[in-house]
């Protein structure tokens, strides 16, 4: 590939950040100094496009923004055309191509925070720091809904640091930047113990949350002493086909929102003659109101490592990518630690537990793009392309990551495999667990584990409502508002009620919440997060927001008709689930809550 | 010259209740064309891999939850396709409204015809509806980039990138409604990797990319396609022998294109063939 550069030079700091990730440049082509050998031997240069996102992170983490010199240096190192790298870097909201302060504050203004006074925090921050843009931004859901309102400060440096403010107090977050110089730590400053996010912590009978808050998430020994790695041993007894049979029999379906049978996905991938097979764990949890995956990763990281190992064993994958959203610093740190420890103890790498299984996990961080949680956009993001969804077919089981057969599963889906193997498919299916993220107007917000079949009322009563419950948003921004609390929390039950379980969001709305503002926020969210690839979503989300703006000041039948037509077109003609669901919540609010009556 | 293809099995599909037999691997669009149906397309390019981004070609496939883009979805044996159903027409109408309200489609061939056919009303979103309006980028003497007319079909990026030219001068930057076609850091073309082959201009479906001659003549109001003749000839520069189609108005070459069905070049040219006509 012949590349043309404009000649911008990286600073020493930028060069060091990239070299720390990639090692020093081997040739002049890669940006090193020209030597005698460079002039005599034509070295073949392979594009390392998939390292683009990590390299951009390296510079952004150390310097705080990505200059043209830094981008050119990255392009030289990886043999990537600068125009394409620019397109990738500008796709992600956590990157800046303009100079900005090292410390950037992300103030969540999304649904759960808005229902808990996030607007007041935002206003106070604006008063203290001026208009948003450089030192602070409004942020989509940070996944800290149980402690709303939330904010997250990310500070570039060596190492970069993060500070969580939840519940956020406007005075402290707007305070002067903290001096950087922290050593890497499993804990993120300001973050409450993960146990606080699980009101049921320590109770008997929990399957998925049994270790959260009771077992040390940093200790592999503690994990093993509490039942860890028994499922993997059982998997080795069953063999790959046996594991898939158990998962099929258990009836497990994907927990990310689409509810596709996991066993069928595994079986289809395992049967593909094309190799290698890849495993991708989708930990890009970004649906507003969702935080269950974060709680699992922070509270029981080894469970995910073990579950990924089992999935890889069953489907014949030698490599797994764990794609975690960029706004989850503590979960990232804990998983990094868990993966490194597991590797050093022979539970990842070559010949795991002496059973001849070779499998390793590479952790990849997202950089602020909801769309990368879409199952094919995640592949593009890992490959160093813009995180745009691909059209299906072909499906991931045939052509996924790097064009190879790929299993992509959500975090919660994967950790369900552990009880399936430990208890057997039938015992598991008899009391199938599901996690729910309860936030909003409740006394005890957090992640709840219930067996399928419980009603919404039981769950809401468990969390204890405050105020007069007006509606519940089920499934997040892509879900729907419901008013009937007696619907059973199952995939069929919610579907029959014209809603969706989605990612398990249960956001309780009381009568103090301004529904029009909430709907506007949902519309803003989809407008911001649309990748821009297809017309119905790229323009439709903008038109939806404009119409809601008009409607919030005066109700006009024409605008309601317009919303319906645009919504239906987004649902029918968009490429991926983002556009297809962008109108769900608004539609349900108009039809069931009579917001614009 | 017709390139020899391996024999392909034929499959039967139903288009609007009519049986059509097409070779396996054909798209729904191929099948529709075989059945004589006129499906609107914008981002589809006959020389490029379908990107299915514009969604004006959506059709209803029986049993599918969502509509399918005809340009890229492969026809399957027994598939029942509705090209003119209420649902498909409604989606096409709204997509045309969304495009028409945000992009200047005045130079898009057939756009006005489709707007009328589907009863689309781009003005319904009001005067305050966001648009992509911006000044045209005139940074070289050969071609102009007027992104107020850009529907973000990705065809120029694909033609510049690994599908044809392998120059990679442009990419899609930004996200969502703010996404644009851009060089790195939005640098002028003269500062980019562009080699001025004009293969992006060749595939642009809306006239967002146009010859400087065309752009200037449109500004003056002298551009008149009814007064133009097209003559296909052979490029006189090198031994490859690419086909050129010279568009002539008032005895002056105003634009150069290349036939897409040429089995060697598929409509692609280099800077000399495309823009080097000054000596004529």
Image (tube, coloured by chain):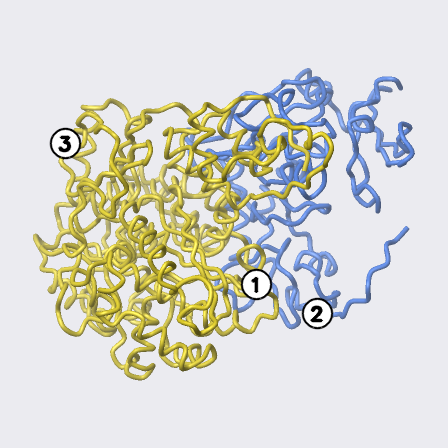
Residue identified by numbered label 1: A276
Left or right placement of residue B197 versus residue A81 in this view: right
Left or right placement of residue A331 versus residue B126 in this view: left
The CA distance from mark 2 to mark 1 is: 40 Å
Left or right placement of residue A67 versus residue A36 in this view: left
Colour chain A appears in:
yellow
Residue identified by numbered label 2: B19
Residue at image x 63%, y 43%?
Answer: A46
Colour chain B appears in:
blue
Residue identified by numbered label 3: A172
In which image quadrant can residue B273 be found? top right
Pick out the residue farthest to the bottom.
A426
Q: Please, is residue A258 above or below residue B257 in the view? A: below
Instruction: State which quarter of the image contains the C terminus of chain B.
Output: top right
- Of A366 and B245, which appears nearest the observer? A366
Q: Horizontal and vertical percent for residue A132?
A: 29, 27
The CA distance from mark 1 to mark 3 is: 50 Å
Label 1 lies in what chain?
A: A
Q: Horizontal and vertical percent for residue A220?
A: 27, 62
């Amino acid at each position: 590939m012949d590349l043309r550069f404009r000649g911008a030079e990286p600073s020493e700091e930028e060069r060091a950040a990239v070299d720390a990730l990639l090692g020093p440049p081997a040739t002049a082509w890669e940006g090193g100094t020209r030597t005698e050998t460079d002039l005599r031997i034509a070295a073949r240069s392979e594009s390392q496009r998939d390292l683009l996102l990590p390299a951009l992170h390296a510079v952004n983490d150390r310097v705080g923004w990505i200059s043209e010199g830094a981008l050119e240096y990255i392009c030289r190192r990886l043999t990537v055309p600068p125009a394409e790298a620019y397109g990738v870097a500008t796709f992600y909201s956590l990157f800046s191509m303009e100079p900005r302060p090292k410390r950037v504050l992300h103030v969540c203004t999304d649904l759960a925070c808005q229902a808990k006074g996030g607007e007041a925090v935002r206003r106070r921050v604006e008063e203290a720091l001026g208009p948003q843009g450089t030192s602070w931004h409004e942020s989509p859901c940070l996944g800290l809904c149980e402690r709303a309102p939330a904010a997250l400060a990310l500070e570039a440096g060596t190492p970069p640091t993060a500070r969580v403010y939840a519940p956020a107090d406007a005075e402290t977050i707007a305070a002067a930047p903290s001096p950087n110089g922290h050593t890497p730590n499993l804990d993120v400053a300001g973050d409450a113990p993960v146990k606080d996010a699980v009101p049921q912590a320590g109770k008997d009978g929990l399957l998925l949350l049994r270790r959260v808050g009771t077992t040390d998430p940093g200790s592999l020994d503690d994990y093993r002493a509490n039942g860890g790695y028994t499922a993997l041993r059982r998997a080795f007894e069953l063999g790959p086909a046996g594991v898939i049979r158990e998962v099929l029999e258990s009836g497990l379906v994907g927990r990310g929102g689409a509810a596709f049978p996991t066993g069928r996905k595994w079986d289809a991938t395992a049967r593909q003659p094309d190799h290698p097979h890849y495993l991708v764990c989708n930990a890009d949890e970004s649906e507003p109101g969702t935080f269950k995956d974060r709680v699992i990763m922070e509270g029981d990281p080894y469970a995910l490592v073990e579950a990924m190992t089992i999935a890889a064993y069953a489907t014949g994958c030698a490599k797994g990518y764990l794609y975690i959203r960029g706004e989850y610093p503590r979960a990232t740190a804990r998983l990094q630690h868990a993966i490194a420890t597991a590797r050093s103890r022979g539970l990842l790498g070559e010949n795991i537990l002496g059973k001849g299984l070779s499998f390793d996990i590479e952790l990849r961080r997202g950089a602020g793009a909801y769309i990368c949680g879409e199952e094919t956009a995640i592949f593009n993001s890992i490959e160093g392309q813009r995180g745009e969804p691909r059209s299906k077919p072909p499906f991931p089981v045939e052509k996924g990551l790097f064009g190879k057969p790929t299993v992509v599963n959500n975090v919660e889906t994967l950790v369900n495999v552990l009880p399936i193997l430990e208890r057997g498919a039938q015992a598991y299916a008899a009391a199938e667990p599901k996690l729910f993220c309860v936030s909003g107007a409740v006394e005890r917000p957090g992640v709840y584990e219930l067996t399928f079949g419980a009603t919404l009322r039981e769950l809401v009563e468990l969390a204890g409502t405050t105020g007069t419950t007006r509606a519940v948003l089920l499934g997040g921004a892509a879900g729907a508002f419901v008013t009937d609390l007696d619907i059973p929390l199952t995939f069929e039950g919610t579907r029959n009620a014209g809603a969706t379980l989605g990612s398990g969001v249960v956001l309780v709305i009381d009568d103090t919440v301004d529904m029009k503002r909430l709907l506007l926020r949902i519309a803003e969210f989809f407008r911001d997060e649309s990748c821009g690839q297809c017309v119905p979503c790229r323009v439709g989300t903008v038109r939806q927001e404009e119409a809601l703006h008009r409607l919030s000041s005066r109700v006009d039948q024409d605008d309601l008709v317009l919303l319906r037509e645009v919504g239906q077109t987004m649902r029918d003609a968009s490429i991926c689930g983002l556009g297809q669901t962008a109108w769900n919540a608004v539609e349900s609010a108009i039809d069931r809550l009579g917001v614009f009556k | 010259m017709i390139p020899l293809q391996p024999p392909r099995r034929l499959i039967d599909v139903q288009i609007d209740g009519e049986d059509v037999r097409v070779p396996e691997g054909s798209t729904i669009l191929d099948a529709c064309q075989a059945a004589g149906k006129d499906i609107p397309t914008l981002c589809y390019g006959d020389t490029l891999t379908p990107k299915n981004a514009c969604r004006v070609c959506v059709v209803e496939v029986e049993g599918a939850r969502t509509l399918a883009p005809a340009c890229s979805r492969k026809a399957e044996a027994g598939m029942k396709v509705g090209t003119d159903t209420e649902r498909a027409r409604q989606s096409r109408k709204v997509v045309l409204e969304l495009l028409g309200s945000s992009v200047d489609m005045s130079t898009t061939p057939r756009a006005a015809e489709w707007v009328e056919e589907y009863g689309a009303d781009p003005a319904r979103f009001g005067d305050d509806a966001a648009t992509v309006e911006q000044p045209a980028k005139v940074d070289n003497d050969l071609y102009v980039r007027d992104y107020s007319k850009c529907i973000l079909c990705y065809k120029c990026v694909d033609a510049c990138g690994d599908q044809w030219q392998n120059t990679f001068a442009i990419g899609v930057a930004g996200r969502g409604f703010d996404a644009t076609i851009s060089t790195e850091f939005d640098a002028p073309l003269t500062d980019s990797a562009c080699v001025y082959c004009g293969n992006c201009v060749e595939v642009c479906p809306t006239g967002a990319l146009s010859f400087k001659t065309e752009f200037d003549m449109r500004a003056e109001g002298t551009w008149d396609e009814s007064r133009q003749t097209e003559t296909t000839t052979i490029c006189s520069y090198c031994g490859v022998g690419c086909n050129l189609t010279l568009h002539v108005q008032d005895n002056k070459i105003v634009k150069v294109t290349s036939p897409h069905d040429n089995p060697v070049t598929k409509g692609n040219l280099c800077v000399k063939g495309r823009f080097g006509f000054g000596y004529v």
